Amino acid sequence: MTDRSTSSTALGFLAILFWSTSIGVSRSLIEKLGPLTAATCIFLLSGVLGCAYLTVIRGGLRRALKLPTAYLLGCGGLFALYEVCLYLAIGLAAGRPQVLEVGVINYLWPGLTLAFAVPILKRRAGVLLLPGIVIAFAGVVLAMAGGDGLSWGRFVEHLCAGPAPYALALVAAVTWALYSNLARKWAGDVEGSAVPLFLLAAGVLLAGLRFAFPEESNWDLSAVSEVLFMALVPALLAYVFWEAAMRRGRMTLVAAFSYLTPLLSMVVSCLYLRVSPGWNLWVACVLVIGGAVLCKRSIRPELSAPAT
């Protein structure tokens, strides 16, 4: 493994740790500002800071704009779609307990990233891939069933009571898994990063939605602090680090570590939001993680090395 691959892989681990704070802090901020206002502030600020950095470093902006067109447009569009879906899912959740359920669904993306690597990056997979996907989705079903017992009727009732957050979280998970693979396919080892441009584009899109659908916002010191934290850590730094890991690091190793994200996020969200999750959510986390583990084990190890 090269030094560049090792450092890029380490950055991927840091991105996962940063993202584990996203759900809890985002919900707290959304309760003050609204989902579109909160997301607009986060991504406009992180995008402006990131683009300012690109203009300061030598050739940064020029290299970003010279990246493949498919990557700039395709991955940029997926990035913006992911952010819109995720923040609407968190914001539309009926209460803080449902936010935890939405978080479990969103964190299907580690297993989906590995699964999508088969058709997109031509990875070879073994027989454990399909059981891994089934187990991960079983965790989602359990999370959505509520904590009073598992039955198909209860699951349907819970889903029909508020389907939008769940649907948006699932779209977000699929979108981010596609983004992670296509960034590798279309950009790979090409020099430069367009993540700051993607952040700014997402912020502009969200700003347009915010003005189209006005929200009532209540600013205070805690809201400002949460915007700054979200813009700098889970947004700017985490996305730049993840991009480096997906393009130049050991992708399957980082994706495998990322299956701990649901558990890390659950713990952080419970502490930050002061919510006690039901037994079903803990089991759901274990199932989602277990499914991702099986997906990782199904990927042939000889093909999990980084691209050179």
Image: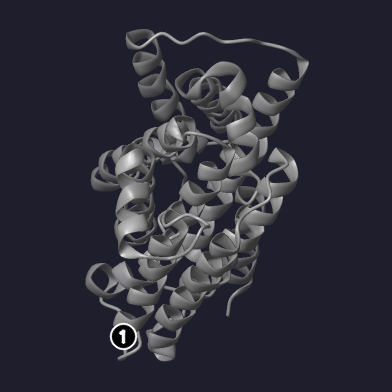
Question: Three-letter amino acid code at disc 1?
Answer: Ala
In the displayed structure, 82 sits above or below 280; it is above
In the displayed structure, 218 sits above or below 279; it is above
Residue at the image point whose x is 38% and y is 65% from the top: 113
**Residue 128 visible from this viewpoint:** yes
**Residue 76 visible from this viewpoint:** no
Q: Give residue 197's quadrant in the image.
A: top left
Q: Quadrant of the C terminus?
A: bottom left
Residue at the image point whose x is 43% and y is 65% from the top: 150
Q: Is residue 225 left or right of residue 170?
A: right
Q: Residues within 10 Å of mark 1 (few under 14, many from 20)?
A: many
Residue at which label 1 appears: 125
Image coordinates of residue 97 in percent, x first then y, are: 57, 44
Residue at the image point whose x is 24% and y is 46% from the top: 70
In the displayed structure, 89 sits above or below 296; it is above
Residue situated in front as seen by the camera: 74 or 115:
115
Mark 1 falls on what kind of element?
loop
